[in-house]
Amino acid sequence: MKPIQLFIIITLLLAGCQRKTSQQLSPPLVSEPDPELKDGGRYIEFPVNSKQIKLFATVKTDNQQYQMSLSAPASVIGRVHKSGGKSLILFDSPDITGVYSAYMQNKSLDRTARINLERITDLYKNGAATGKEFNDASAELMSVQTSLAENEARLREAGLNPESLNRGPVGTVWLICDLPESELNLIKKGQKYDLKFPSFPNETFTANIDVVADVMNTQTRKLKVRLSLFDRQEKIRPGMYAEVKFEAPHKGLMIPKKAVISANARYYVFVKKASNIFERREVALSSEAGDYIEISGGLNIGEEVVINNVYLLKGIDLGI
Amino acid sequence: MKRFIQFIIKNRAVVLLGALLLAAIGVWAWFQLDIEAYPDISDTEVGVITQLNGLPAEEVEQQVTIPVERALNTVPGVISKRSRSIFGLSNVTLTFNDKTDIYRARQLVLEKLKDAELPDGVEPVLTPMTMAMGEIFRYVIDAPDSVPLTYLRELQDYVIIPKLLQAEGVVDVSNFGGLERQFQVVIKPIQLEKYNLKVQDISDAITANNKNTGGNYIRIGSSQMNIRGIGRIAKAEDIGNIVIDNRDGVPILIKDVANVEIGNFPPNGILGYSDRSRGVSKNMSIEGIVLLKKFENPSHTMVNVYEKVNELNNEILPKGVKINTFYDRTELVQLTIETVAKTLMEGMLVVLLVLTLLLGNWKAATISALAIPFSLLFAFICMYLTGIPANLLSLGAIDFGIIVDASVVMVEAIFRNLGSASRFDNGPGIQTVVIRSSREIQRQILFTVVIIIVALLPMFTLQRVEGRLFSPMAWTLSFAILGSLLYSLTLVPILASYIFKTNSSEHKNVVWSVVQKGYQLILQRALTIPKTVMVVASVVVVLGIWGGTKLGSEFLPELDEGCIWVRVFLPSGISLESARQYPELIRKELMKYDEVKGVMTQHGRTDDGQDPFGPNRIEAMVQLKQPYDSWASKRTKKELVLQIKNRLENIMPGADFTITQPIIDMVTENATGSSSDLAIFINGRNLDTLRHYSEKILAIARKISGASETAIEQENKQTQLVVEINREAAARYGVNVSDINAVLEMAIGGLPVSSLWEEERRFDIILRYNRESRNTPEQIGSIIIPTKTGLRIPLSQVATIKLAEAQSIICRSDEERQITVKTNIRGRDQGSFAKEVREKIDKQIKLPANYSYSLGGQFENLQRSQSRFAFIVPITLLLIFVILLIFFKYKFKYAFIVMANIPFSIIGGVGALYLRHINFSISAGVGFVSLAGVCVMAGVLWVSYLNRLNRKSKIPLKEVVLNGSLVQFRPIFLVMLIAIIGLLPAALNTGVGSDVQRPLATVIVGGLISSLLITIITTPILYLLSHKEN
């Protein structure tokens, strides 16, 4: 055999041998075993030493105090003015002014009618007045009282308590605010609240709730609330708008919002039951405050809820 | 034929010149050829996208998807119709048969779409005319962190995309990520109450105060002046100053009741990327995806794109803003072309060496080996003329062995005749010897080449994906073989007549004489016990074929794209904001692997809605370092993928993953509706029933060995907030449903009411309540609805606001709702897996009436091509048989002897697949087909030579067979050995793009080895036996 041929054969053989398979290197990463679902998916149980458990960090639930707040528009409906030594109430609408005047008139008429009736009764008892006179006097009183009641009702409907209107010193300003039904838990009679007027954007005023209307408007589901404040500088005019911030401290079971997931048309959180067991628990939500949300049912104080990768737990539990 | 060779030899100088010219044209054609990585395998498709802001999936299905599907019912040539409806988006995709012209299909769809009864203002649009592999270029826009994303988005929308669209071949550029600037009129509901206004009033005011008009023209003196009324909103302050109403002479302006803010559209998707080479990692960035027009060539287009990118980077974009490439298809083209070139070069070199070694004459070897460049150049010309692009599949299939075969046979014949001629002192001249040898052999060569081409017939008949994959391969191979035929019949004799001398006999060849001695000994022994040998051979064949049925099967060996595509499915209902941590986590984890060059995460969907993905979907493109053998870890890509899969599953339990590659992901998803290896489609009407059964099937599929990334494709229901209007209450208050809807759309939904132009840039003006008034169900319930009577009532008075379950996605296939259980198959072949799935489902699950299931995904393609093969392979064999009959002048026995070679070669192919753990795929099938061609060729040469000897001589048949076989052994041994060696590099290569060739090459190499070992014994024996019986 010629050396050249030998050489070629050897080269070819070597070339063929070079491609050896060198595949036994780092063993492929092993998969973590799947967690188990128990009780129809209510509990997720990880193997005790699973590294995945630490993905689901928890917080302990506790009652927390927070400020619930709501802004609502209010309008100035009236103000006590001083006019020739007497105080005069100015309203934002002629209607109410009319009603109020009528009310005030009725009030004095009522007083006169009452005195008149007392007098006639006395005379009638002593035979000095006729039965007709007595009847007329009682009828007059009744009619005055009826229109008094009617006007009072109209004022009350507008959110005004005629009794307290009279008592306000000069400079008292009344505001009416419609509050939605759902927010009524925020207010308390006699409480002070901040309010702002667009006319005076840099000033904050404080007002008290005087009256909470007796009847809710069934159509708008709103309740009228009257507030009053004392405006010494006579800046505020009837008809002005204001924005009232109702705030109330509230204590409740607060958890971070991100702990809550929605599924099956319900809200759930995952509660850590043991070091490796998580429970899916339906909860009822209440108000939000910042990144937190109040849980009004389904959770107890001291339980640990998952706050990280909550949706991954949902995936394990309920699928994609 | 006789005159042909004489003519050629006579005019040999002219023919040679002609050949040189042809070669020159071939070189030119090569530079004209379209070069791509993989052929375009997508079906002709037309997609219809309809966006409906804020509408939930059921509504989208009912109001848009179904009407669109119905309207498109009559479009001809449709083979499948699929749709997906998600929140705010409807996608309907029609797949057409191969014959449909895409332009016509689009035209028809547009025409029929007009008939669809859709809600007012809903405009369906067609998807860009691209293909599954159309995403050829992905770039990111980089800028210092101080540059706001809204500004980058503006550059993208109004500078970059319009510029890139100018590049020839680009059909569309999709944006992903960034923030779209919009002008937001943020309404304070308190103020609305105060002024007793409605949302509608504000929207009306804006539309009424935002218009430019033309007042035609007036004539002043002799000139004509056009009149233009300018009333368009030009800046944010303009919006604030629009008057809504006038109360006692005091105007109420928009700024009295709302703040006008410049904000951004809530994003549908977030893009992040990490690039190791540039050391950049960004959690919020902006990407552009350049889509290639169908039928355009990626390489040519990329040249145009880069031209525009350079122009943008150097001249147009502001300082600091730069377009950087993240993914470029030409890299893949480069890699695959390198792979092909490498195997081609190796093959060519090896063939040349072996020829020199075995012919013992370097001149003869060179003449034979020159067939390779000549055939290739010839093939390039044909490819250029027929428009077949050069790619891994068309070029990768070229087996030099087969190409050289014809010329080797010719050279060998000339050489042999020269040897016998030189024994006489004044023998015939060189030209006479050449002419005589050509005549002796040219008929055989012609017929065998025809047979090889006929053997390729099954590949021409494949349809759809596999057809587009393999028919270019069949064409190119046929062209090259034709070229080699031309070369062997014309140039080989001519070159021989120039180069060989009459006395240039063969050198004493040591290698060869040893081989021949051995063969002689074996054949002599075998001829004494012919029947025993045949029985043993038959047993081997039966065993081999039985073994073949045990082989696993798969559609296509993975076409390696040099990168990884990860699809992540998070649980449905998650918000974009809370899901944002995951793309960041995924990128961080993947970048820990040194092999990873860069990761890009697409979270959510693009703004134009080509993919109906919600915020629970993440797609990650993982770029790998090239070449693979530079990896320090010495891992294979397969191992890396497995590692990545396990890693991701470990850090994100509860999420589903599908790991594929970008192109194949799109191709299979478009073709079959699922990007996984196997999809189990469950069709029916009720989605709950479908979900119930799909969960059962999922449980079955998960337990089958080999199942990986198994999950239900469609996300489960998600909880939504339903505002259910109480008609009775609404009537009582005199509220129209449209009033309520208007408030919902505008106050909560942020409906665009008008637009604002800044030069050519257009921005939406939207209305929205301030955040505090629309954040919780309670707040939504207290949104004020104006009534006819002037009363203002809260929404909760006329509607119930509650949580309800609703579909996340509704998929339909051929107008039936569908849920898909998808699975990848790892460490097991697809065929047997699918069989097991089918058996288990049939056994364990009984679907109710009108509900059915079917298997699809990549498997669908395998099934279709298998049934096609089952039909066409017998026909091909019959055709080959008929050709053989013609060749042997209708002597059946000779045709049979030749055909008997086929089973002997098949067992070798099966054995080789088995040894290398390669499953049966279409690629392997193609290998078997070419194998059959080569074996038949060998048989033809053998039998026809024996016939010739037998006719001439009077010596006993056994002697004739022995002597003839000894002579013919050399060309056949050569032909087969060269075919084996020529494909050996392709069988062993592991680079990007080698996966397609490997099964094919393995089959041919294995088959030819068995054929070489068995047929050289069996053919003479069969010949002997067939004559004895006479």
Image (cartoon, coloured by chain):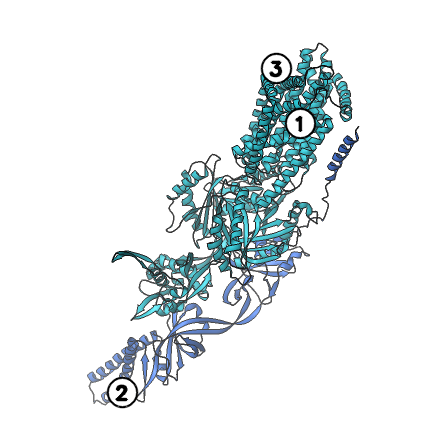
Mark 1 Cα shell of 10 Å, populated few (<14), some (14-19), many (≥20): many
- Image spot of residue B207 (x, y percent): 35, 59
Chain the render paints cyan: B
SS type, badge 3: loop
Say which of B965 and B216 sits in front.
B216
How many angstroms separate mark 1 from mark 3 (CA)?
35 Å
How many angstroms separate mark 1 from mark 2 (CA)?
143 Å
Q: Where B907 sits versus B208, above or below? A: above
- Image spot of residue B169 (x, y percent): 49, 44
Say which of A198 and A5 sits in front.
A5
Q: In which quadrant of the rendered image does the C terminus of chain B lie?
A: top right
At x 46%, y 55%, the residue is B158
Mark 3 Cα shell of 10 Å, populated few (<14), some (14-19), many (≥20): few
In this structure image, what is the colour of chain A? blue
The residue that mark 1 highlights is B367
Q: Amino acid at mark 3?
A: Lys
Q: Amino acid at mark 2?
A: Ile
Left or right of residue A137, residue B960 in this image: right
